[in-house]
Image: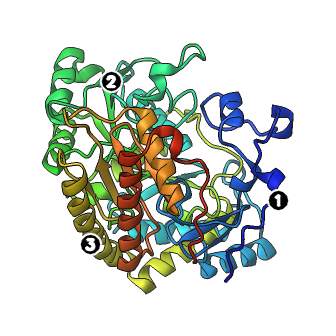
C-alpha cells in the first residue's frame, strides 16, 4: 500500500467560516474548534486493521480506538457481513411498542446474557451509553416507588466522573454537570471526592444523607475523563456498602466492559455483582450504535409487572435494532473464536510493562495503572502536579506527528488501542510515545503539532 500525500495545497488551509462546516457536534464551542487546527486534510477517509488514514494521506495507529469503541479494529469482516445480511433480511423492527420484536434481537439478548454467565439475567437495549446510564438511574428510582420507598431519590456519583451527556447523564457526571448552563437537570445528585478512599467517601455520604434517602451509587471502575483507577479492594468495599444498606450499585462499564479490561465486566471480574451494568462502546465494535443495561433478577421481578401498572419512562424506537443485534452476535462469535479476552489480558500486561518502563524513565513520579488494553499514563511535573491541559494537548499532537492517536484525561494519557492489537503494535505505541515526549521536552508548544508528515503503513 502506498502512502502518498494526496491532499491538494488548499486542503491544508483552515476550513474557513462556519458555513463551510455546518456540523455542530460535541459539548465544546464550535467556532474555536473550526478556527483552530481543523483542515480538510485532517478528515479521516479510510481504515484498515488498527490504523486509520486521513485525507492528507497519513496513516495513524489508532490507540484511542476511535472513541474507545473500535474493539475489533477497522477490518472486522465478519461483523460487516452480518450487518449487510441483516440489512437485506430485516433492516428495522421495534421493541418500543406492539408485540412483534425482531427474532434476531431475542437471539442476541440470549447470547449476551450467556456471555455474562447469566449473573445479571435480564437486559434492556438502547442506542448509547448515555441513554442507558440515564435508564439505570430512572429504573433505580422507579423501583423505589414500586417497593414503597419513593423518598429514596438521592444518587451518589464521583467528582470528575463521566456518565454521558444529556439532561440525566450530565446531571450525574461529576465533570459535565459542573459546567452546565442549560438550566435545572436531574435533581438530588451528590458528588463525592475521588481522593481519600471511595468506600470511606460513600460511607460518609450515607451517614449524612441517610440510606433511607439514597437510591443508587453509580461508578466507573476506571474513570475515563478524570484519569483515575481505584484500588480493586476499594471498589469491592463500595459494593459491599451498597449491599449492606440496600442501595443500588450501578456499574458504568461503557468503557471498561466488553473485553476492554480483559473481561466482559471489570466488576464481575473483581468478584462484584452490581445491581445494574451499563454497556456500550465495544458491544458492536463501534460499527453501529448500541447501548445495553444488564440488571439483576431482583430488579426485574419488581419492575416487570408492577401492581398497579406503571410506566417506566425510558426507551426509543430504535432500541434493540436488528442491525445492531446482528452486529453484536457477530462480535460475540469473534470473541469466542479468537479468544479475545485472554488475548487482551496477555497483550495488556505486555503493554503495561513497557509503558511502566517508559514512565519510570521519562516521568518518574506516579505509575502506569489500568487493566487490559485500557492503560493510564499519568503525567506530572517535578513537584507532582498534573500537567496543565495545554501541555497535555501539546503531547497529543506530538504523538500525531509520530503517527499515533491517543486520548487525554485530566491527569495524563489513556492508551486504549483495539482489542486485536499485538505485542508488536504495543512496541510501536510505546516508541512513538517516547519520541513525542522527547519532542515536548525539547521544543515549545508552538513547534509541536504544526503538521504531521507521518507515513506509517497498515
> Residue 416: where, in percent of width, then height?
42, 59
Quarter of the image with the N terminus in it? bottom right
Kindly give the residue lying farthest to the right in the view shown.
19
Visible residue check, residue 252? no
**Image height check: is 432 above or below 201?**
below
- Residue at x 43%, y 29% (from the top left corner): 175
Q: Are marks 1 and 3 in contact (CB under 8 Å)?
A: no
- In the drawing, what numbered circle is on residue 127? none
**Which label lies toward us, 1 or 2?**
1
- Residue at x 67%, y 59% (from the top left corner): 321
Residue assigned mark 3: 350
Q: CA separation, marks 2 and 3?
A: 35 Å
Q: Are marks 1 and 2 in contact (CB under 8 Å)?
A: no
> Residue 358: where, in percent of width, then height?
25, 60
- Callout 2: few (<14), some (14-19), or many (20+) C-alpha neighbours within 10 Å? some
- Residue at x 76%, y 62% (from the top left corner): 92
- Callout 3: few (<14), some (14-19), or many (20+) C-alpha neighbours within 10 Å? some
> Which is nearer the eye, 247 or 250?
250
**Image height check: is 458 above or below 207?**
below
Q: Which mark is first along the chain, 3 or 1?
A: 1
- In the drawing, what numbered circle is on residue 191? 2
Q: Which mark is first along the chain, 3 or 2?
A: 2
> Which is nearer the eye, 65 or 83?
65
Q: CA separation, marks 1 and 3?
A: 41 Å
**Image height check: is 405 above or below 198?**
below
Q: CA separation, marks 1 and 2?
A: 50 Å
What SS does tag 3 mark?
A: helix
Residue assigned mark 1: 8
Amino acid at each position: 500500500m502506498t502512502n502518498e500525500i494526496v491532499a491538494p495545497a488548499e486542503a491544508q488551509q483552515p476550513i474557513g467560516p462556519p458555513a463551510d462546516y455546518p456540523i455542530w457536534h460535541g459539548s465544546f464551542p464550535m467556532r474555536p474548534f473550526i478556527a483552530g487546527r481543523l483542515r480538510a486534510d485532517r478528515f479521516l477517509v479510510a481504515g484498515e486493521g488498527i490504523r486509520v488514514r486521513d485525507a492528507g494521506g497519513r496513516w495513524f495507529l489508532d490507540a484511542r480506538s476511535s472513541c474507545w469503541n473500535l474493539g475489533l479494529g477497522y477490518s472486522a469482516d465478519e461483523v460487516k457481513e452480518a450487518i449487510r445480511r441483516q440489512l437485506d433480511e430485516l433492516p428495522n423492527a421495534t421493541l418500543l411498542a406492539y408485540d412483534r420484536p425482531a427474532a434476531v434481537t431475542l437471539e442476541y439478548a440470549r447470547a449476551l446474557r450467556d456471555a455474562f454467565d447469566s449473573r445479571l439475567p435480564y437486559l434492556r437495549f438502547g442506542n448509547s451509553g448515555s441513554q442507558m446510564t440515564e435508564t439505570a438511574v430512572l429504573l433505580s428510582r422507579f423501583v423505589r416507588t414500586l417497593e414503597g420507598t419513593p423518598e429514596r431519590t438521592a444518587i451518589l456519583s464521583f467528582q470528575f466522573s463521566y456518565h454521558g451527556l444529556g439532561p440525566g447523564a450530565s446531571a450525574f457526571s461529576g465533570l459535565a454537570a459542573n459546567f452546565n448552563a442549560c438550566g435545572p437537570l436531574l435533581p438530588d445528585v451528590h458528588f463525592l471526592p475521588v481522593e481519600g478512599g471511595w468506600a470511606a467517601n460513600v460511607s460518609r455520604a450515607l451517614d449524612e444523607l441517610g440510606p433511607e434517602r439514597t437510591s443508587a451509587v453509580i461508578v466507573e471502575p476506571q474513570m475515563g475523563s478524570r484519569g483515575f483507577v481505584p484500588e480493586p479492594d476499594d471498589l469491592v468495599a463500595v459494593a459491599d456498602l451498597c449491599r449492606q444498606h440496600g442501595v443500588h450499585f450501578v456499574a458504568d462499564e461503557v468503557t471498561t466492559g466488553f473485553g476492554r479490561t480483559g473481561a466482559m465486566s471489570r466488576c464481575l471480574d473483581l468478584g462484584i455483582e452490581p445491581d445494574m451494568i451499563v454497556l456500550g462502546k465495544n458491544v458492536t465494535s463501534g460499527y453501529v450504535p448500541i447501548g445495553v443495561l444488564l440488571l439483576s433478577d431482583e430488579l426485574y421481578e419488581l419492575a416487570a409487572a408492577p401492581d398497579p401498572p406503571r410506566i417506566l419512562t425510558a426507551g426509543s424506537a430504535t432500541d434493540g435494532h436488528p442491525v445492531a443485534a446482528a452486529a453484536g452476535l457477530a462480535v460475540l462469535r469473534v470473541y469466542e473464536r479468537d479468544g479475545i479476552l485472554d488475548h487482551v489480558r496477555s497483550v495488556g500486561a505486555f503493554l503495561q510493562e513497557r509503558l511502566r518502563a517508559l514512565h519510570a524513565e521519562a516521568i518518574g513520579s506516579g505509575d502506569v495503572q489500568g487493566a487490559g488494553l485500557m492503560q493510564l499514563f499519568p503525567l506530572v511535573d517535578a513537584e507532582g502536579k498534573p500537567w496543565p491541559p495545554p501541555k497535555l494537548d501539546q503531547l497529543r499532537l506530538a504523538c500525531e506527528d509520530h503517527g499515533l492517536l491517543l486520548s487525554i484525561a485530566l491527569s495524563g494519557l489513556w492508551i486504549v488501542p483495539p482489542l486485536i492489537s499485538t505485542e508488536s503494535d504495543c512496541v510501536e505505541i510505546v516508541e512513538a510515545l517516547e519520541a513525542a515526549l522527547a519532542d515536548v521536552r525539547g521544543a515549545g508548544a508552538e513547534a509541536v503539532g504544526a503538521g504531521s508528515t507521518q507515513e506509517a503503513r497498515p
